[in-house]
Image (cartoon, grey):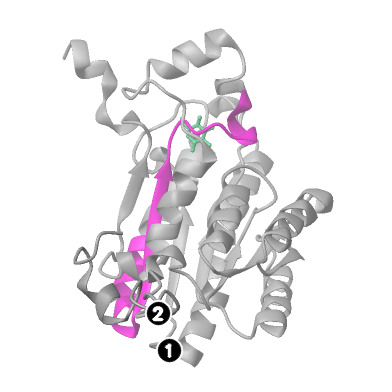
């Protein structure tokens, strides 16, 4: 390297004797979640899996929640371990109060505390409105909304108990609700799902308002048109893909990794002043694309 380019290196003696060890500052942005523990619900597939892997890559220890398919959850744990990270698979149905409490005890036993909760678990039970059964309604509301409440309540109790640990994070805790573009876009044939996501938005905002004084940050991410198992029908055939693209100005399907990058940012201190926001990661799906050529 030409001398004089970096005064610090010459001051430290590099190249002069050819033997000085120069220690440069490490860039903390590379591991923005180092020393933190995260719990990701529904982390054995789709967006949850991608978020769990990304949080681990950012330095967090991760609880990988699942309710079905333990092998898939273990595979996520194994991937994290093979990269030198820490993870544990945690079975629990997020709509069950006792199972959620037991999951949190197991997480705290393993990692000591929790810094980040990703309320990701969610499902669909679609039906025309007049045919929707109470069971379809209750299943969606219980997992997508009550599940977010139950997990958030346990996390908040631990955040309040522990408070801010400045070496770890500016905040006492971070909660990210995995919502959907359907927290604002009505969705015929999916009234239960849209109602659960509209509910998630107001749960997020009300919690954010109540908990911000305790330095607990609560925010939502709103995916739209992401390639996941839950919405396979929307992308797996060429015709389905083409009609999905009519709704996406950016003209590509989103990938779980698109959401994972946003989640890492939102969980990190880089997003410290974000409180109660809905971050839409949807290729422009919420830009009313139908109005691009009309209205
Ligand atoms: C749903 C998907 C749907 C997407 C856009 C998501 O929240 O889970 O099934 O394709 O919204 O409509």
Mark drawn on residue 165 = 1
Residue in view at x 38 percent, y 60 percent: 266
Residue 199 appearing in the image: no
Q: Which residue is mark 2?
A: 169
Q: Nearer the viewer, residue 114 or 103?
A: 114
Tell me if residue 151 is in the magenta stretch.
no
Q: Is residue 11 above or below residue 103?
A: below
Q: Nearer the viewer, residue 193 or 137?
A: 193
Name the spot of residue 79 as percent of width and height, x first: 71, 54
Res. 106 in view: yes
Q: Is residue 80 left or right of residue 199?
A: right
Q: Is mark 1 within 8 Å of ligand 1?
A: no
Which span of residues is magenta-colored?
A: 204-232
Q: Residue at x 31, y 77 (%)?
A: 212
Q: Residue furthest left?
A: 295
**Residue farthest along the right direction in this orientation:** 71
Rendered view: 290 above or below 42: above
| Looking at the image, residue 104 lies above or below residue 256 | below
Closer to the camera, 216 or 110? 110
């Amino acid at each position: 390297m030409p001398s004089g380019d970096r005064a610090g290196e010459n001051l430290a003696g590099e190249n002069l004797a050819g033997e000085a060890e120069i220690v440069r500052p490490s860039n903390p942005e590379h591991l923005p979640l180092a020393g933190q523990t995260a719990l990701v619900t529904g982390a054995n597939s789709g967006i949850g899996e991608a978020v769990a892997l990304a949080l681990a890559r950012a330095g967090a220890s991760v609880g990988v929640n699942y309710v079905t398919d333990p092998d898939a959850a273990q595979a996520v744990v194994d991937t994290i371990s093979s990269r030198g990270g820490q993870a544990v698979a945690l079975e629990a149905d997020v709509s069950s109060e006792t199972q959620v409490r037991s999951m949190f005890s197991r997480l705290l036993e393993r990692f000591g505390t929790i810094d980040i909760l990703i309320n990701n678990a969610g499902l669909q039970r679609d039906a025309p409105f007049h045919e929707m059964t109470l069971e379809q309604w209750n299943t969606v509301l219980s997992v997508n909304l009550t599940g977010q409440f139950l997990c958030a309540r346990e996390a908040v109790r631990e955040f309040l108990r522990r408070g801010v640990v400045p070496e770890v994070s500016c905040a006492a805790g971070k909660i990210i609700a995995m919502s959907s573009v359907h927290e604002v876009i009505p969705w015929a044939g999916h009234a239960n799902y849209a109602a659960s996501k509209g509910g998630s938005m107001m749960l997020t905002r009300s919690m954010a308002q109540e908990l911000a004084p305790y330095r607990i940050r609560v925010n939502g991410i709103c995916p739209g048109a992401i390639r996941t198992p839950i919405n396979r029908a929307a992308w797996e055939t060429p015709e389905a893909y083409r009609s999905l693209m009519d709704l996406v100005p950016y003209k590509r399907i989103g990938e779980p990794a698109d959401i994972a990058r946003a989640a890492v940012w939102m969980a990190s201190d880089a997003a410290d002043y974000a409180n109660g926001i809905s971050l839409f990661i949807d290729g422009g799906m919420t830009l009313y694309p139908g109005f691009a050529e009309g209205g």
